[in-house]
Image: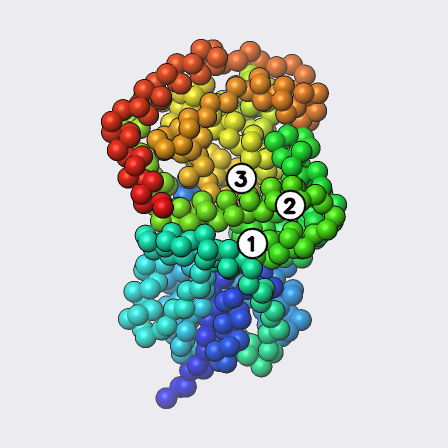
């Protein structure tokens, strides 16, 4: 009877790094030979939030990580297929004792995939060790003591990893290789997008701490200046090229910037964890207005307006420049993200779900845990947040006074605005505030605040 090799598997998801990767550390501690894998799942391409730019960033990150692992005699095995069928295949050629991964705070589709995997592993007597990710805790009640817990995690020492070559597993053949057409598509990486990978993440962090952090606070709201003086770490954090803990400790140790800039950035790093934890506890954010008083959306859907906004053809300069920048580069600063969502929901009077899907495709740094709570907050449908309605002309005066950002992205000849957006903003403000003051909205707000204590 054929004897199968007894191994463990490191299942990479949004932790595409070697440094401070607890899954690889755990696999080393367990002492069995282990295989490191990543799975490109064809079904995810059907999601309304998916875009090839996300996979290209992931693929580039995998190439960089594989190069770093090769120094230690290890490599990443990349598969094309649904996660369940890949693990079914691996169990036909290995005896798997443990699968190690982080707990992904993803969209509903990946959560349901993990439920299917958990059942499969249990049925086949495979232990799945899921490690909390970036200090986020799973479960409805995980926000109890959250602040103290995440502060403790940020302060813990980062994990040093030196994989042992004798623990590397050799996979002689892979029946689920990336198809040639897919590999070719992923191998093309546009120059306008940030370079993927752990090495690049560390370079960006170093330049931020040593040179750019000093002007962070003054530049954070300005779309032109923030291209340089924001940290630009968001895609690296989103796909785990670098850990939030590593970023936190590096910024804390920086002595080349003002205390106000350091504190401003660190507060936003905690804010990031806060919103991801909120989404983990209330995944309903993905599909429905979290406050029932704002369902259904009180205005009519107009697909022509939605398309014009997505293409940057509304005739409103700063809005259009932001959307064209996002399409070309995958990144814009937070203030501009909030503004285009507000314009979409309040000036165009369109439901936030369409903005959420469009922007998820455009954001290279799409992070579900931040994305959905923020979209709903800017749309004004949470009930317990102030309804924020951004005037795009005021934002232009305040944050692109000399038109430098708009000149980068807009043609000289501009169309007239496609709607009377000033009138629409006023109408939306009245209607949304009326809903917010309703008894149902107040009860819902109290319920939501109690859940998020």
User: Which residue is label 3 attached to?
Assistant: 363
Q: Residue at x 24, y 29 (%)?
A: 440
Q: Any mark on residue 244, and which?
A: 1
Using residue 5 as the reference point, say whether residue 412 is left or right of it: right
Q: How far is disc 2 from disc 1 in space, using C-alphas?
A: 15 Å
First in residue order: circle 3 vs circle 1:
1
Q: Residue at x 44, y 81 (%)?
A: 6
Q: Residues within 10 Å of mark 3 (few under 14, many from 20)?
A: many
Task: Give percent across and percent down for residue 117.
Answer: 35, 63
Where is residue 384, by image quadrant?
A: top left
Q: Nearer the viewer, mark 3 or mark 2?
A: 2
Q: Is residue 165 above or below residue 297?
A: below
Q: Residue at x 43, y 14 (%)?
A: 426
Image quadrant occupied by the N terminus: bottom left
Helix, strand or loop for disc 2: helix
Q: Nearer the viewer, mark 2 or mark 1?
A: 2
User: Which residue is label 2 attached to?
Assistant: 262
First in residue order: circle 3 vs circle 2:
2
Using residue 376 as the reference point, say whether residue 153 is left or right of it: right
Q: How far is disc 3 from disc 2 in space, using C-alphas?
A: 25 Å
Q: Residues within 10 Å of mark 1 (few under 14, many from 20)?
A: many
Q: How far is disc 3 from disc 1 in space, using C-alphas?
A: 19 Å
Helix, strand or loop for disc 1: helix
Task: Give percent across and percent down for residue 147.
Answer: 45, 52
Q: Is residue 24 above or below residue 248?
A: below
């Amino acid at each position: 009877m054929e004897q199968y090799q007894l191994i463990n598997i490191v299942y990479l998801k949004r932790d595409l790094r070697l440094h401070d990767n607890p899954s690889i550390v755990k696999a080393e501690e367990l002492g069995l030979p282990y295989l490191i894998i990543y799975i490109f799942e064809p079904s995810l391409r059907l999601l309304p939030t998916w875009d090839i730019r996300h996979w290209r960033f992931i693929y580039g990150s995998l190439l960089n990580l594989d190069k770093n692992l090769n120094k230690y005699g290890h490599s990443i095995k990349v598969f094309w297929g649904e996660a369940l069928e890949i693990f079914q295949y691996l169990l036909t050629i290995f005896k798997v004792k443990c699968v190690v991964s982080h707990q992904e705070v993803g969209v509903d589709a990946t959560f349901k995939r993990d439920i299917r995997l958990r059942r499969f592993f249990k049925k086949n007597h495979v232990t799945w060790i899921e490690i909390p990710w970036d200090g986020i805790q799973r479960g409805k009640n995980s926000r109890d003591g959250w602040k103290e817990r995440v502060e403790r995690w940020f302060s813990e020492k980062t994990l040093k990893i030196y994989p042992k070559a004798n623990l590397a597993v050799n996979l002689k053949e892979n029946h689920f290789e990336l198809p040639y057409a897919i590999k070719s598509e992923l191998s093309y990486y546009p120059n306008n997008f940030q370079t993927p990978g752990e090495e690049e993440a560390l370079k960006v962090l170093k330049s931020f701490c040593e040179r750019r952090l000093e002007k962070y606070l003054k530049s954070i709201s300005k779309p032109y200046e923030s291209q340089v003086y924001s940290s630009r770490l968001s895609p690296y954090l989103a796909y785990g090229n670098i850990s939030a803990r590593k970023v936190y400790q590096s910024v804390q140790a920086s002595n080349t910037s003002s205390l106000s800039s350091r504190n401003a950035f660190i507060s936003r790093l905690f804010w990031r964890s806060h919103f991801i934890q909120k989404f983990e506890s209330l995944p309903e954010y993905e599909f429905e207005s979290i406050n029932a008083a704002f369902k259904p959306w009180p205005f009519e859907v107009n697909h022509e307006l939605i398309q014009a906004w997505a293409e940057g053809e509304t005739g409103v300069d700063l809005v259009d420049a932001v959307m064209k920048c996002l399409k070309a580069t995958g990144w814009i600063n937070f203030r501009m993200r909030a503004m285009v969502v507000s314009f979409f929901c309040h000036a165009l009077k369109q439901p936030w779900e369409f903005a959420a899907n469009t922007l998820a495709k455009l954001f290279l740094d799409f992070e579900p845990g931040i994305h959905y709570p923020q979209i709903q907050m800017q749309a004004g449908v949470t009930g317990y947040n102030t309804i924020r309605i951004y005037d795009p002309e005021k934002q232009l005066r305040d944050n692109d006074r000399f038109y430098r950002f708009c000149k980068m992205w807009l043609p000289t000849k501009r169309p007239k605005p496609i709607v009377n957006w000033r009138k629409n903003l006023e109408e939306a403000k009245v209607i949304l505030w009326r809903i917010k003051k309703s008894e149902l909205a107040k009860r819902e707000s109290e319920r939501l605040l109690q859940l998020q204590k």
